[in-house]
Every structure is written in structure tokens, then in C-alpha cells.
Amino acid sequence: MSHWRQYDMACLALRDMSLGVWKGFVGVDRKHPFYGKSIEDILKTEYAMEVFFEVYGGLCSAGRLPTRYRDYSSNLWWIGIETSHGADLMPLLKLNTDDPDMAKMVSHQTYKNFMFIRKETNKLAKFLSRMT
């Protein structure tokens, strides 16, 4: 886990150990138009397509952080992205490696590391900071 500030916004990167992928989050306060909105509601806004093209994979989550990260939450609403899309290697995903089709598919996937998620989280922070 790593946290930092970018464009005066709280940012957080976590490694999801169920799949071994990175997730990035930007915290927005009560004044932000996305504060308190579900991911479904956010995706219905006029900004949804712009975010999709601005940030890798588009938005994937919105809400409070799990309680184990409450020291970082400081009453923010966290907007998240992740690296578990079709072309992403998920190192902890259990696959049948004896299947030649599966092996071929995995050979084209790439692992998105911490530096990648940090860069994309910073892009999200920039976009969200322009909305306030």
C-alpha cells in the first residue's frame, strides 16, 4: 500500500491479493460532485466517457475504504480504478496451464505494476481535481 497527494487530492494504491493486481483510488470530499455517488450513478454522468478515455480501464469503484484502511480515509469518498482487465496479467489468478488456449491468451497479457497504477491514479486525480 502506498499513499500520496497529487493535484491536492488524496491518492492511494493497494495491491489486491486475491488476483495480485494493483488498484488506485482518489479521495474526494463533500464538495465534489462525485461524493456519495455509487459507481453506477457516476457512470451515468456526462463525465463518464471522458474518464473512460482519460484513465486506464475507466472507473471501477466508488465508496468508503475498508475499515483496515480507515487511517487514510479521513471522511473521503474514494473513486477507484484497477488493473484487472482483459489484457492484464493477474498473477494470482488460478488458471489451467495445461490448456493450450489458456497459455496462448496469458502470453499476450502484461502485468501492470505499482508505477503504472500510480501514473494512472495521478491522471484520475488530475481529472477529478478539475471538477471541483
Image (cartoon, grey):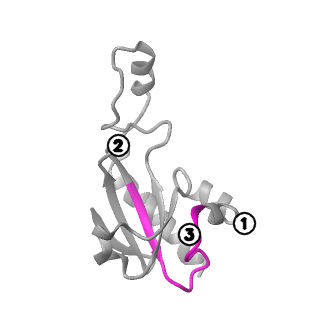
Amino acid at the residue labelled 2: Leu
Write down the region rendered in magenta: 23-39
- Please tell me which residue is depicted at 39% across the width and 68% down the height of the picture: 65
Q: Of discs 3 and 2, which sits in the foreground?
A: 2
Quote the CA–CA distance across marks 1 and 3.
Answer: 13 Å
| Residue 124 location (% of width, % of height) | 50, 65
- Please tell me which residue is depicted at 31% across the width and 37% down the height of the picture: 91
Nearer to us in this view, 121 or 101? 101
Image quadrant assignment for residue 120: bottom left
Amino acid at the residue labelled 3: Phe
Quote the CA–CA distance across marks 3 and 2.
Answer: 27 Å
* Residue count near mark 3 (Cα–Cα under 10 Å), binned few <14, some 14–19, many ≥20: some
**Rendered view: 42 above or below 84:** below
Amino acid at the residue labelled 1: Glu
In the rendered structure, which disc, 1 or 3, sits on the residue that comes first in sequence? Answer: 1
* Residue count near mark 2 (Cα–Cα under 10 Å), binned few <14, some 14–19, many ≥20: some
Specify whether 62 is left or right of 11: right
Q: Which residue is mark 2?
A: 19
Give the SS element for disc 3: helix
Q: Of discs 1 and 3, which sits in the foreground?
A: 1
Image quadrant assignment for residue 10: bottom left
Do residues under tags 1 and 2 come within 8 Å of each other at their CB atoms? no
Give the SS element for disc 2: loop
| Residue 31 location (% of width, % of height) | 56, 86
Q: What's the mark number on residue 127? A: 3
**Rendered view: 55 above or below 111:** below
Give the SS element for disc 1: loop
Q: Which residue is mark 1?
A: 46
Quote the CA–CA distance across marks 1 and 2.
Answer: 31 Å
